[in-house]
């Protein structure tokens, strides 16, 4: 019996799919490449923007004809999309051949839901409970030498554009000892990079009894013996502390790399987004990061077209992008999400949004290109991650700052640290040769 998982969205979902794989393998399923060979197909969904939802719906639609020929195939839709108000009912109406719908907090129920379906139950819909942060599911890891580790679930911030707090519930931190024990085990197993995951890692511990915080967790993990790297995401400018920045700077094994979403360069828009920091505070954090870690790679998320964004606000975003010079930026057009405050405001027209994203992307591309060129001629330690997707006889990996480097080498290098001299660059990508 075979399974296929289709994953959409963020790293949290990528890791959740590893848990889905773990649960399916525990009840006897094996992975396969194509949906049409699978006995169980799981869609692990995202609803952060309309484009994500449309794509997923299109892909569920494709299965209709396969399911008509193979009635015993089980289709499950799980994750964020199903957790929106009314979404499960809508899914069942649009795609009546979907067998199982589970919300983000009911993931652990997937094996029982599949068993029930195989025993002939008509369809299964669950989306109510709140999964405790202590629940441990089996994991089939698929991203060696990196291992994802959840440190917390949910989000309390309610940024006015964002659906996440509605579909993932309130913040729940895992116990510090549980996280440290998991990381310790992974390093002993040979993983070389640990990426800590949370919607807002900087508020880790605020719900724990003993005053633990993210800096303390980082320090405990960095003290584990061995040669490995620590990364984490996502940081929030309203909560990041000097203590966290100091710990990052103090420990060599914590990568000098941070993803710090700014969203907008306008203090007025940031206020309307409910972000709880302003432009000046954001720039001050960048200064502190760079003064303590001069070679730090900083990436960000930026949104254009928030309902109240004027041309002047947008220009402030452009100005901030020019000032900070991010290594890379993930840029998005604001997409109204039903049930969030910003969705009820008057919206900007599509042409304005399109013009702004085009200008922003062009500006950032220039910066990314110029910063990439600065790597040329220097030697960096790279952790080899995989064979290069497009080049024969080549592998790829990352510098500590988070830059992807491609160079000649074979698959047996995966999981090793090698020194690579950078010889050329192409936008955000670097190319080099082993020293
Ligand atoms: N529309 C567009 N982008 C969004 N993001 C979050 N919500 C929305 C939305 N409604 C972006 C933010 C966030 C990233 C993960 O997705 O920039 O940091
Ligand atoms: Fe969404 Fe804001 Fe929470 Fe990030 S911090 S998940 S943008 S509500």
Image (spheres, grey):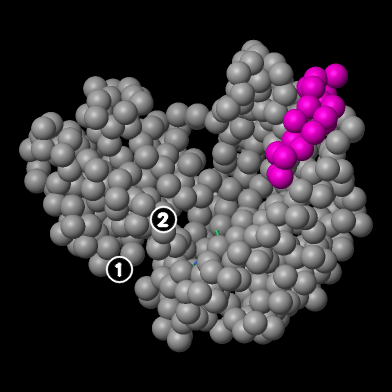
Magenta residue span: 418-435
For label 1, count other residues whose C-alpha is less than 10 Å away and answer few (under 14), some (14-19) or many (20+).
few
Q: Which of marks 2 and 1 is nearer the N terminus?
A: 2
Q: Position of residue 383 (x, y in %)?
A: 72, 28
Q: Is the CB of the residue bearing disc 2 within 8 angstroms of ligand 1?
A: no
Q: Quadrant of the N terminus?
A: top left
For mark 2, give the secondary structure: helix
The answer to which of 221 and 416 lies nearer the viewer is 416
Name the residue: 70% across, 28% down.
Answer: 406
Decide whether the magenta segment is chiefly helix, strand or loop.
strand
Location of residue 429 by image quarter? top right
Q: Can residue 106 be seen in this view?
A: no
| Placement of 126 over or under 3, stated as above or below | below
The Cα atoms of the two marked residues, 2 and 1, are separated by 17 Å
Q: Where is residue 311 in the image (x, y as percent from the top left)?
A: 65, 82
Q: Is residue 307 left or right of residue 359?
A: left
Label 2, on which residue?
52
Q: Where is residue 68 in the image (x, y as percent from the top left)?
A: 11, 38
The answer to which of 105 and 82 lies nearer the viewer is 82
For mark 1, give the secondary structure: loop
Q: Is residue 248 left or right of residue 294?
A: left
As for residue 431 lying within the magenta part, the answer is yes
Label 1, on which residue?
85
Location of residue 82 by image quarter? bottom left
Name the residue: 71% across, 77% down.
Answer: 315
Tally of marks: 2
């Amino acid at each position: 019996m075979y399974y296929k998982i289709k994953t959409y969205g963020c790293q949290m979902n990528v890791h959740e799919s590893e848990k889905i794989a773990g649960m399916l393998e525990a009840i006897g399923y094996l992975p396969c490449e194509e949906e049409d060979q699978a006995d169980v197909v799981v869609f692990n969904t995202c609803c952060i923007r309309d484009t994500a939802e449309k794509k997923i719906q299109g892909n569920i639609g494709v299965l209709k004809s396969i399911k008509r020929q193979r009635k015993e195939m089980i289709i499950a839709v799980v994750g964020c999309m199903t957790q929106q108000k009314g979404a499960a009912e809508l899914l069942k109406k649009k795609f009546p051949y979907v067998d199982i719908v589970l919300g983000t907090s009911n993931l652990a129920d997937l094996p029982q839901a599949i068993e029930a379906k195989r025993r002939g139950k008509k369809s299964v819909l669950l989306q109510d409970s709140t999964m405790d942060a202590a629940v441990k599911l089996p994991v089939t890891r698929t991203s060696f030498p990196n291992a994802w580790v959840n440190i917390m679930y949910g989000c309390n911030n309610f940024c006015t554009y964002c659906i996440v707090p509605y579909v993932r519930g309130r913040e729940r931190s895992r116990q510090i000892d549980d996280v440290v024990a998991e990381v310790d085990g992974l390093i002993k197993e040979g993983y070389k990079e640990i990426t800590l995951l949370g919607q807002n890692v900087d508020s880790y511990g605020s719900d724990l009894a003993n005053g633990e915080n993210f800096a303390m967790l980082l320090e405990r993990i960095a003290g584990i013996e061995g040669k490995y790297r620590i990364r984490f995401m996502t940081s929030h400018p309203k909560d990041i502390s000097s203590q966290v920045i100091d710990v990052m700077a103090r420990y060599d094994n914590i990568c000098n790399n941070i993803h710090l979403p700014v969203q907008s360069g306008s203090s007025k828009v940031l206020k309307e987004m409910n972000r709880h920091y302003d432009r000046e505070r954001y720039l001050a954090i960048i200064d502190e990061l760079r003064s303590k870690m001069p070679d730090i790679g900083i990436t960000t998320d930026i949104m254009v077209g928030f309902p109240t964004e004027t041309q002047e606000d947008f220009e402030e975003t452009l100005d901030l992008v020019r000032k900070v010079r991010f290594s890379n930026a993930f840029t998005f057009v604001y997409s109204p999400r039903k049930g969030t405050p910003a969705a009820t405001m008057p919206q900007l027209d599509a042409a304005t949004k399109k013009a702004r994203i085009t200008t922003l992307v062009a500006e950032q591309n220039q910066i990314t290109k110029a910063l990439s060129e600065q790597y040329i001629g220097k030697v960096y330690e790279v952790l080899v991650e995989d064979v290069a997707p497009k080049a024969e006889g080549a592998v790829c990996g990352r510098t500590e700052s988070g830059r992807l480097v491609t160079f000649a080498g074979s698959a047996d290098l995966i999981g090793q640290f090698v020194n690579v001299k950078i010889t050329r660059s192409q936008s955000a990508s670097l190319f080099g040769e082993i020293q």
